[in-house]
Image (cartoon, helix red, strand yellow):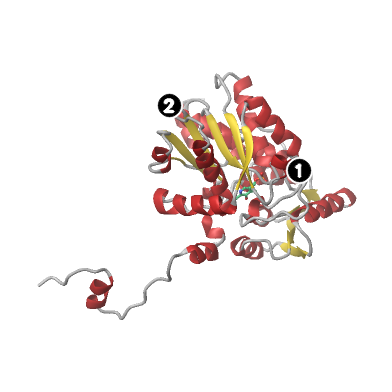
């Protein structure tokens, strides 16, 4: 493929851009809401504070529904259509339902989402409502909702689009391809939040596929981070009542547990936990020092990076990528709650503006 053709394909969605590397047939509809091809942004602050000059953020909040879930959803929905399915279902901490609802609306499918009661960020629920999904609020947690949709899809002609659907991870692996396509090689480290553990599994699949194709000479160390109150992989056993401010990773029994552990071990990486305080500190730092407003769950990767550096991980001369999984606009209340003081209200005069800014009036 020549360069211009590649350029033209770069923003045409995940299915077209990586069609040769995905489970696509001539019968797969090549749908796209413009997912993928997200920015890889060089850090100007956090990298310096930890001695890592080559730190990058992969901004997955720039996907159409505001999280990386769109990469997998477009493949899962295309394959559902190829199989002539007309209904899709998922359990969700929020972003999967937002993504499923978006692609379901785009493709004219019936979309059913099960969300744990009181545990979904307002923006994510607003999306599912706006896209017209049928929303069932389950009196239980995410793990229970996932069990329900698994059973439902086993006994009805309904396609499950959670990450236990293998097409989801196939689509999500394209983020690893993009990192390599931009950097020219794999980074030394990949820092990533871990909830249901599908994404860390998908990145590892992507890097491993490029490695097998000899597109990269080595694979990165996979550094996954759970929240302390929802850290089953770190603890080595399921957590019955997971708690954390980061709702997108509030999961007590990850579906891709085994694969995540394999990715960690094969890569020589780690899966560790960070506290809600560390997550919130990273969330604020990302917005105020890097100009990147992300979800608290996304900040877990940054919190994990900073914790690793504090614990002695030497990143001098290393290349690291932090996956910023979703946008902070999903949960605007949280940013407001974190503000030191509410914004100042003033009369509409220049004098009041100057006074508020401690500026001395000129002439
Ligand atoms: C889904 C999600 C995660 C967790 O990803 P898993 O694949 O479940 O490990 C992290 N951050 C955000 C914003 C998410 O939507």
Give 4 or 206, whichever is nearer the viewer. Answer: 206
Residue 343's image quarter? bottom left
Where is residue 32 drawn, in percent x and y? 60, 46
Q: CA distance from mark 1 to mark 2?
A: 35 Å
Residue 32 placement, left or right of 360: right
**From what the image shows, is residue 263 above or below residue 135?**
above
Where does label 2 land, which residue? Answer: 317
Give 297 or 89, whichever is nearer the viewer. Answer: 297
**From what the image shows, is residue 237 above or below residue 259?**
below
Give 124 or 264, whichever is nearer the viewer. Answer: 264
Residue 43's image quarter? top left
Query: Does mark 1's beta carbon lie closer than 8 Å to ligand 1?
Result: no
Residue 173's image quarter? top right
Q: Secondary structure at mark 1?
A: loop
Residue at 70% x, 56% y: name it.
Answer: 108
Where is residue 120 drawn, in percent x and y? 66, 61
Where does label 1 land, which residue? Answer: 255
CA neighbours of label 1 inside 10 A, class few (<14), some (14 to 19), many (20+):
some
Where is residue 143 drawn, in percent x and y? 77, 52
Give 328 or 213, whichever is nearer the viewer. Answer: 328
**From what the image shows, is residue 43 above or below residue 130?**
above
Residue 25 is at least partly visible in this image: no
Residue 327 placement, left or right of 84: left
Indicate which disc, 1 or 2, sits on the residue closer to the N terminus: 1
Number of marks in the rendered image: 2
CA neighbours of label 2 inside 10 A, class few (<14), some (14 to 19), many (20+):
few
């Amino acid at each position: 493929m020549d360069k211009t053709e590649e350029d033209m394909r770069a923003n045409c969605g995940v299915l077209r851009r990586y069609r040769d590397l995905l489970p696509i047939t001539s019968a797969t509809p090549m749908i796209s809401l413009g997912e993928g091809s997200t920015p890889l942004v060089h850090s100007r602050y956090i990298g310096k504070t930890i001695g890592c000059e080559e730190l990058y953020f992969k901004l997955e909040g720039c996907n159409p529904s505001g999280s990386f879930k769109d990469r997998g959803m477009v493949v899962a929905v295309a394959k559902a259509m190829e199989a002539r399915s007309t209904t899709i279902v998922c359990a969700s901490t929020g972003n999967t339902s937002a993504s499923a609802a978006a692609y379901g609306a785009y493709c004219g499918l019936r979309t059913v989402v099960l969300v744990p009661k009181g545990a979904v960020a307002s923006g994510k629920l607003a999306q599912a409502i706006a896209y017209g999904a049928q929303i069932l609020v389950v009196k239980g947690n995410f793990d229970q909702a996932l069990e329900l949709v698994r059973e439902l899809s086993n006994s009805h002609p309904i396609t499950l689009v959670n990450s236990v659907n293998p097409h989801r991870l196939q689509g999500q692996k394209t983020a690893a391809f993009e990192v390599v396509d931009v950097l020219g090689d794999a980074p030394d480290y990949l820092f990533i939040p871990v909830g249901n553990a599908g994404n860390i599994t998908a990145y590892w699949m992507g890097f491993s596929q490029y490695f097998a194709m000899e597109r990269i000479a080595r694979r990165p160390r996979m550094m996954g981070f759970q929240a302390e109150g929802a850290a089953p992989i770190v603890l080595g056993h399921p957590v019955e009542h997971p708690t954390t401010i980061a709702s997108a990773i509030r999961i007590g029994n990850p579906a891709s547990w085994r694969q995540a552990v394999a990715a960690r071990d094969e890569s020589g990486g780690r899966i560790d936990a960070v506290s809600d305080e560390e997550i919130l500190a990273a969330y604020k730092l990302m917005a105020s020092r890097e100009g990147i407003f992300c979800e608290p769950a996304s900040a877990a990767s940054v919190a994990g990076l900073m914790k690793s550096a504090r614990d002695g991980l030497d990143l001098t001369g290393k290349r690291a990528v932090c996956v910023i999984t979703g946008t902070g606009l999903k949960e605007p209340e949280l940013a407001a709650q974190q503000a030191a003081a509410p914004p100042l209200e003033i009369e509409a005069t220049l004098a009041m503006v100057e006074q508020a800014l401690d500026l001395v009036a000129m002439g």
